[in-house]
């Protein structure tokens, strides 16, 4: 069983639509959770951390369900510039531990 | 956010040569640096964790004699791919974690290695 699982997509979504991604993780000892964005042939960039209470940053909302070991990302009013691969990332310990990445979900926003 | 640089950004080399990749934290002291590798259409895989002044800890399946890591200062870690072969061709990315920035790691721009 993979440690972090995501639907690879691609998700083809019209501009302005709302899109949601899910991710599951297998290690119940995981402590920290993140969504990263990776553009083609570039390094991952932190999009947002994910907290148990849920958190929102502009058009982006992240949710964590520890009981189900499930993380979600919602993008509202999608823009063409949102086209990228979204990586679900889990950290077991503190910041001094390596991150475990999902394979990513590929999102294509269509005009 | 914090800035991490990597050099070179792209390397093309012949099989059998060694390649050194540098990772620098530019505006913070990185107590821990990480090296990841990403093959096409695959997720980033952690190769090793390095703490300043001590030996790196390698993930299972990563050969420590092939991938030499040195973390000599709080702002610099190097990865040397020794006797590179075509199967080592990949995107190598470092990340850094510092005592000031505690929530996550910050990534360098990556080094694309092509071994002919």
Image (tube, coloured by chain):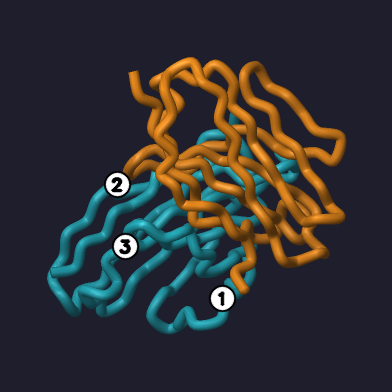
Chain colours: A orange, B cyan
Q: Secondary structure at mark 3?
A: strand
Q: Secondary structure at mark 1?
A: strand
Determine which residue is flagged by label 2.
B9
Q: Position of residue A41 (x, y in %)?
A: 32, 44
Between circles 2 and 3, the one closer to the viewer is 3
Determine which residue is flagged by label 3.
B90
Q: Position of residue B88 (x, y in %)?
A: 30, 72
In the foreground, B98 or A72: A72
Disc marking residue B38: none
Q: Secondary structure at mark 2?
A: loop
Q: Residue at x 56, y 41 (%)?
A: A36
Residue A30 showing in the rendered view: yes
Q: Residue at x 38, y 48 (%)?
A: B110
**Mark 1, chain letter?**
B
Q: Position of residue A92 (x, y in %)?
A: 75, 61
Q: Place residue A98 in its image quadrant.
A: bottom right
> Which of marks 1 and 2 precedes in the sequence?
2
Determine which residue is flagged by label 1.
B58
> Which of marks 3 and 2 precedes in the sequence?
2
């Amino acid at each position: 069983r993979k440690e972090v699982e995501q639907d690879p997509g691609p998700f083809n979504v019209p501009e302005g639509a709302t899109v949601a991604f899910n991710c599951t993780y297998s290690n119940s000892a995981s402590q920290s959770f993140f969504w990263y964005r990776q553009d083609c042939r570039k390094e991952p960039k932190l999009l947002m951390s994910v907290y148990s209470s849920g958190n929102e940053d502009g058009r982006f909302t992240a949710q964590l369900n520890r009981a189900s070991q499930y993380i979600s990302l919602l993008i509202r009013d999608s823009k063409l510039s949102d086209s990228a691969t979204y990586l679900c990332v889990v950290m077991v310990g503190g910041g001094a531990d390596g991150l475990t990445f999902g394979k990513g979900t590929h999102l294509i926003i269509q005009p | 956010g914090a800035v991490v640089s990597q050099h070179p950004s792209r390397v093309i080399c012949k099989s059998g040569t060694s390649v050194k990749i540098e990772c620098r934290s530019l505006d913070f002291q990185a107590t821990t640096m990480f090296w990841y590798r990403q093959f096409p259409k695959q997720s980033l895989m952690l190769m090793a964790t390095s703490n300043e002044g001590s030996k790196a800890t390698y993930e299972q399946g990563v050969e420590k004699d092939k991938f030499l890591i040195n973390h000599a200062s709080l702002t610099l870690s190097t990865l040397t791919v020794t006797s590179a072969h075509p199967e080592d061709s990949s995107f190598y990315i470092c990340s850094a974690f510092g005592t000031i920035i505690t929530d996550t790691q910050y990534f360098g721009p990556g080094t694309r290695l092509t071994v002919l």
